[in-house]
């Protein structure tokens, strides 16, 4: 165990040395996560409390980022909104990548008609823009945070599945898998022992690559009124409705949440790029 | 080559058929009923029998397979049926909106390519210099910025500093180029920026890869005189993955601009799709999904054809 | 004004009275006719949604009324300048039998449809039969509103007779329904679905074109039966769903008006941009938001809990605040605050949740919660429709109000389809509901509060709460049959107290407010409490 530990530490040290930007992005994400975790202590106001004495208040010492149409503090809502963004981002890309990974690996391993059918289905599913797919799934499930996570995760599945399957396929043809099959090892054992470790890199890369996407998608769907519901603090929701209608009168309502989304997605993308280069340069796009 | 392409072309038919089946099933899973929605949502009191009569008229009481056959039998004649909401032919409903979405997609692509190719090539050629870093920052930021938010900021700037106001409704290019471009240039910019980010990155990495090939290195070594030719050579080979990205992104812009259309008040395919879903207009949702998938499949075919044409080394087995 | 009716009074008194009346009329109408109406010009206005079919008999959305109503006439209509007065349209006069069950309308002669055919009583009979007794697969969403009608007859080309099965005090208003467009009998006979996709009426404007996803155009009917009308050469309705774009269109003068209504900040935006070039008209609105409780679920089956929920809402404070950002405002009871059945202020303030001392009300609410055994931090779901204005605003407000008595509310937002399905299936704890009508009448507006099941087995599908309250049923019946107006009013008040204060089956949040900021170039238009009434016949634009 200590050896493994040290190996991980050296890997991390190498990553930091070779990819300083990626490391900085990782640090920024950790910072954001702490802000989200400590929102209860840091936020100056209750994010859902209406204050009709301070509607559309401009940024000031009392409200650093101003207030919205209900007099809710924009800063507090952004801090709490980080929770929603991270929750939706992590949960949906984790679920999406995991389902995609499992389907991809088993499909590649077993091959045959089922694999063919899954491939055709995935091919067809990726012929729709992600947002269209997500909209259709939201229509089936309904809006709300949990359904949103499911919808985003499902719309990622075919894309992730195709990549993981490709990697798994190359492993399947290798000598040791053939050998393991020949000596009659159990399927799940071969899959766990030999295939899964070999697709971990593409899995992790896809997972981080889709994190930023998930947050953008959450913002888009909430903006359309089909994602997170009021009065939950969520960045995309903060941009919808009044923020656009009164952009001239209260531009802070639109500027700050958008900035939060952009910076967060930026951090995830930079981290994702560096991870990809470090783990599996073949997947570069 | 022609035979290969013909076969690929013919293969599109079963693919589209499968797409149609999946779409049909997907749409029927969406809960909610267009008839109740339409007759009751205004708060009026309507009896069950009236609702049943209307369902019958729309053909919703027929068995599912029958509905499917009805829909499929129209497709060869390009008849997508009638919208259940407006009773107008779907082709007629889509016509103007498709024009808008198509033009916006083309404009965004042009903008993206105009930005991406020079930046991507410059970054690759000057790898590791401030040019490279600058380009990377621009493109990473482009990927992270929600284009609808960029749209909102753009509108804010236009409204408050230039007192600019877009035309109310879409005017086709040939009717009034000025009104048309005035309306579409800003969303095209907002979308084009994001789109260019994807393409720049692809151009850069594809160029980097080609520039490392032996023949290119040799040419480099021979001196500056051949450099231009080399870049041209390299570009030709690097172009294919770039073209693929451009093509796929283009296909996704038809229908994928749901939010941008909302921000810029454009009546395009994306907005029609959102409306159709909200109304549970089955035939319309089906038609739009089929349209979007068809565009994707056709673009894919064109990319493939381009591959064959650009690179004779590709075998058409 | 009584003076003008005094028979045989002294001439000078009569003269003074006539002058005074004239002066009053002039003063009242001054803002509308300060200038001589100008003929010509094209009115561009905004419609925020596109119409489904073109047949008003089967639709219930303003998105059809606004662009298409100018192509048609009604039998009688609400006076656009003095709602709710009913004035002639295609009927030039009418008589009501003493027992109130026979309505005889005299039809105008010489009215022609846009295709040149002459309008007769046959067309009116055919149109109304399509509405009241739809045949085959013809859908009428208003058949239920005319259950009292036994038959529609056309004894001669200029007479239409409605025979009612029982007396209906508001039948005339009911016939003034803006949805009851008069169609051509021959066309209906050939194809009863023809009007779903085509336009052909007798109205002030002829249909020119409808480009889906863009606009709708009408042109002046040169042979219109009202001499000198319409003033406009034509109109262009542009479909703009985006609220910000609507405001920008009015601000820039590209459109002159939107006839449904803007929110207060939008109004302020427009006024700031146009300055004296903007005119703002405001009115109460015959629409409101309520909250329905699912009385089949615990603890919503407990009147004390429901009452606590109503007490927690600071309606007066909310009215002041929300009326700055949303299209809601007036605090009211069961009937429209400015309408003939409005609750007097003194009565209103006695209802649960309508007092001015919100601290006391919340203390009482907490006491009731304790009595009902509902713990602090109790959670429930609030079902809502995913419509921005004003549903989203109302819900954010309500959730914050209930938070202040220690309740945690989960906002469940659904698209209209699934939202309605959940309401009708009783699949909710509490639900934001809405009502929107075109005339004030207790028979019409209170019917949805009747028991879900009547003793005779009839089902009230509009009672989403699922309760049975025979007292409400009895009070409704009594007020409906009441000959005496004062007595009817008293019964309505009793109904109100029972519903909103004793049992609290449902609660009213706020009534809507209609705000129409428009270009000052638009004249001859007066905002009313319904957004279903515009017909553009008398509208004109200056310069």
Image (cartoon, coloured by chain):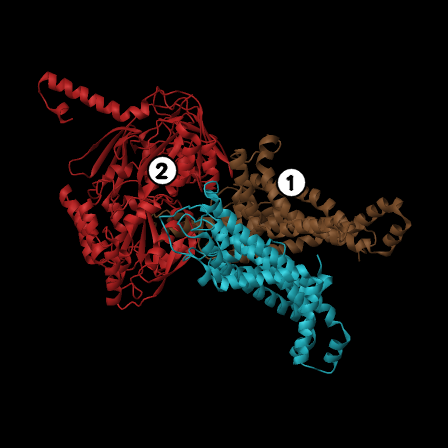
Q: Return the chain for callout 2.
A: C
Contact? badges 1 and 2 (CB < 8 Å):
no
Q: Is residue A63 above or below residue C40?
A: below
Chain to which the residue tagged by mark 1 belongs: B
> Residue A211 falls in which quadrant of the image?
bottom right
- In the displayed structure, does residue C10 sit left or right of residue C141? left
Colour chain B appears in: brown
Q: Does residue A165 appear in the picture of this structure?
A: no
The percent coordinates of residue C399 (x first, y second) are 36, 56
For mark 1, what is the residue?
B107
* Residue A65 at x, y percent in the picture: 47, 50
Query: What is the residue that sits farthest to the front in this orientation?
Result: A61
Q: Marks 1 and 2, how far apart in space?
A: 39 Å
Q: Are marks 1 and 2 on the same chain?
A: no
Image check: C330 left or right of C184? Answer: left
User: Circle 2 sits on which residue?
Assistant: C515
Identify the chain drawn in cyan.
Answer: A
Element type at mark 1: helix
Q: Secondary structure at mark 2?
A: strand
* C183 is higher (above) or lower (below) than C165: above
How crowded is the residue under tag 1: few (<14 C-alpha within 10 Å), some, or many (20+)?
Answer: many
Q: Nearer the viewer, residue A112 or C13?
A: C13
Q: Disc 1 vs disc 2: which is toward the camera?
A: 2
Q: Residues within 10 Å of mark 2 (few under 14, many from 20)?
A: many
**Relative image position of residue C73 (x, y in whole percent):** 35, 31
Q: Is residue C292 left or right of residue C217?
A: left
Residue C85 is at least partly visible in this image: yes
Q: Foreground: A84 or C536?
A: A84
Chain ID for red: C
Side (left or right) of B22 relative to C103: right
Q: If the image is split into quadrants, where does the C terminus of chain B sit? A: bottom right
């Amino acid at each position: 165990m200590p050896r493994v530990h040290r190996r991980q530490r050296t890997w991390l040290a190498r990553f930091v040395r070779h990819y300083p930007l990626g490391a900085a992005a990782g640090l920024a994400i950790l910072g954001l996560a702490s802000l989200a975790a400590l929102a209860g202590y840091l936020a100056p106001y209750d994010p859902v409390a209406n204050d009709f004495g301070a509607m559309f208040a401009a940024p000031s010492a009392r409200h650093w980022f101003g207030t919205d149409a209900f007099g809710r503090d924009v800063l507090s809502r952004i801090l709490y909104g980080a929770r929603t963004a991270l929750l939706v981002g992590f949960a949906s890309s984790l679920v999406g990548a995991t389902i995609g990974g499992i389907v991809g690996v088993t499909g590649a391993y077993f091959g045959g008609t089922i694999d063919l059918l899954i491939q055709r289905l995935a091919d067809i599913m990726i012929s729709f823009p992600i947002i269209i797919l997500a909209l259709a799934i939201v229509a089936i499930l309904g809006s709300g945070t949990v359904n949103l996570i499911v919808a985003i995760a499902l719309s990622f599945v075919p894309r992730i599945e195709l990549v993981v399957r490709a990697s798994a396929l190359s492993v399947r043809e290798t000598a040791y898998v053939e050998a393991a099959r020949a000596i009659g090892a159990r399927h799940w054992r071969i899959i766990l022992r030999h295939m899964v470790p070999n697709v971990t890199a593409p899995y992790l890369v896809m997972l981080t690559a889709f994190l930023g996407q998930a947050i953008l998608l959450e913002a888009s769907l909430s903006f359309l009124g089909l994602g997170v519901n009021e009065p939950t603090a969520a960045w995309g929701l903060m941009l919808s409705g009044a923020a656009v209608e009164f952009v001239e009168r209260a531009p802070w309502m639109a500027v700050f949440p958008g900035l939060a989304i952009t910076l967060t997605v930026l951090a995830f993308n930079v981290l994702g790029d560096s991870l990809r280069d470090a783990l599996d340069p073949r997947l570069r796009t | 080559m022609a035979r290969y392409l013909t076969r690929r072309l013919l293969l599109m038919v079963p693919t589209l058929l499968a797409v149609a089946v999946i779409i049909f099933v997907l749409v029927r899973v969406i809960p909610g009923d267009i008839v109740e929605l339409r007759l009751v949502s205004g708060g009026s009191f309507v009896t069950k029998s009236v609702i049943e009569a209307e369902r019958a008229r729309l053909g919703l009481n027929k068995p599912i397979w029958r509905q499917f056959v009805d829909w499929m039998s129209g497709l060869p004649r390009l008849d997508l049926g009638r919208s259940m909401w407006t009773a107008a032919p779907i082709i007629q409903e889509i016509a103007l909106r498709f024009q808008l979405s198509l033009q916006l997609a083309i404009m965004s692509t042009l903008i993206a390519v105009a930005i991406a190719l020079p930046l991507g090539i410059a970054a690759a050629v000057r790898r590791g210099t401030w040019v490279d870093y600058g380009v990377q920052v621009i493109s990473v930021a482009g990927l992270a910025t929600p284009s609808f938010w960029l749209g909102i900021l753009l509108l804010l700037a236009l409204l408050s500093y230039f007192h600019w106001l877009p035309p109310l409704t879409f005017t086709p290019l040939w009717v009034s180029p000025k009104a048309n471009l005035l309306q579409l240039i800003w969303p095209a910019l907002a979308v084009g920026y994001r789109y260019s980010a994807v393409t720049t990155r692809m151009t850069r990495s594809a160029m980097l890869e080609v520039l490392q090939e032996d023949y290119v290195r040799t040419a480099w070594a021979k001196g500056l005189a051949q450099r231009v030719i080399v870049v041209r050579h390299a570009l030709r080979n690097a172009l294919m993955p770039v073209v693929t990205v451009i093509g796929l992104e283009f296909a996704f812009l038809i229908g994928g601009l749901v939010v941008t259309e909302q921000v810029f008040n454009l009546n395009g395919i994306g907005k029609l799709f959102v409306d159709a879903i909200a109304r549970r207009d089955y035939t319309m949702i089906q038609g739009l999904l089929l349209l979007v998938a068809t565009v994707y499949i056709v673009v894919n075919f064109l990319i493939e054809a381009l591959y064959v044409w650009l690179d004779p080394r590709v075998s058409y087995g | 004004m009584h003076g003008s009716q005094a028979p045989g009074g002294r001439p000078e008194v009569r003269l003074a009275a006539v002058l005074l009346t004239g002066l009053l009329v002039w003063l009242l109408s001054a803002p509308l006719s300060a200038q001589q109406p100008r003929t010509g010009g094209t009115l561009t206005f905004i419609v925020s949604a596109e119409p489904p079919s073109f047949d008003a008999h089967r639709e219930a959305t303003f998105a059809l009324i606004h662009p298409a109503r100018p192509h048609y006439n009604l039998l009688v209509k609400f006076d656009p300048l003095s709602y709710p007065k009913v004035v002639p349209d295609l009927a030039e006069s009418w008589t009501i039998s003493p027992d109130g069950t026979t309505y005889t309308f005299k039809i105008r002669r010489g009215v022609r449809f846009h295709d040149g055919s002459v309008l007769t009583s046959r067309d009116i009979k055919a149109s109304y039969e399509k509405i009241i007794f739809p045949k085959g697969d013809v859908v009428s969403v208003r058949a239920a509103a005319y259950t009292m009608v036994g038959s529609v007859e056309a004894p001669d080309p200029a007479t239409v007779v409605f025979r009612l099965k029982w007396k209906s005090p508001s039948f005339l208003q009911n016939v003034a329904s803006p949805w009851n467009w008069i169609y051509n009998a021959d066309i209906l006979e050939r194809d009863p679905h023809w009007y779903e996709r085509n336009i052909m009426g007798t109205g002030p404007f002829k249909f020119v074109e409808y480009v889906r996803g863009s606009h709708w155009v009408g042109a002046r009917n040169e042979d219109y039966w009202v001499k000198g009308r319409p003033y406009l050469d034509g109109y262009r309705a542009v479909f703009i769903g985006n609220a910000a774009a609507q405001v920008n269109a009015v601000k820039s003068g590209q459109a002159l008006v939107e006839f449904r209504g803007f929110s207060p900040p939008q109004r302020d935006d427009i006024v700031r941009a146009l300055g004296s070039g903007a005119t703002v008209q405001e009115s109460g609105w015959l629409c409101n938001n309520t909250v329905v409780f699912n009385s089949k679920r615990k603890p919503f089956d407990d009147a004390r809990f429901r009452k606590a929920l109503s007490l927690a809402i600071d309606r007066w404070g909310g009215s002041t605040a929300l009326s700055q950002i949303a299209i809601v405002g007036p605090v009211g009871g069961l009937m429209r605050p400015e309408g003939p059945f409005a609750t007097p202020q003194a009565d209103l303030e006695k209802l649960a949740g309508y007092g001015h001392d919100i601290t006391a009300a919340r203390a009482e609410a907490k006491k009731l919660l304790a009595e009902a055994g509902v713990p602090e931090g109790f959670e429930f779901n609030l079902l809502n429709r995913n419509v921005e204005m004003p549903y989203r605003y109302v819900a954010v407000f309500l959730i914050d109000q209930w938070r202040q008595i220690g309740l945690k509310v989960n906002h469940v937002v659904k698209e209209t389809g699934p939202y309605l399905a959940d309401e009708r299936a009783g699949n909710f704890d509490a639900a934001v509901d809405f009502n929107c009508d075109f005339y004030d009448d207790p028979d019409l507006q209170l019917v949805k509060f009747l028991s879900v099941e009547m003793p005779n087995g009839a089902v009230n599908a509009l009672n989403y709460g699922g309760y049975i309250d025979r007292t409400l049923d009895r009070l409704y019946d009594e007020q409906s049959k009441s000959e005496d107006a004062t007595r009817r009013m008293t019964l309505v008040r009793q109904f109100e107290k029972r519903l909103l204060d004793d049992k609290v089956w449902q609660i009213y949040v706020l009534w809507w407010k209609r705000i129409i900021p428009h270009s000052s170039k638009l004249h001859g238009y007066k905002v009313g409490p319904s957004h279903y009434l515009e017909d553009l016949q008398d509208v004109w634009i200056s310069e």
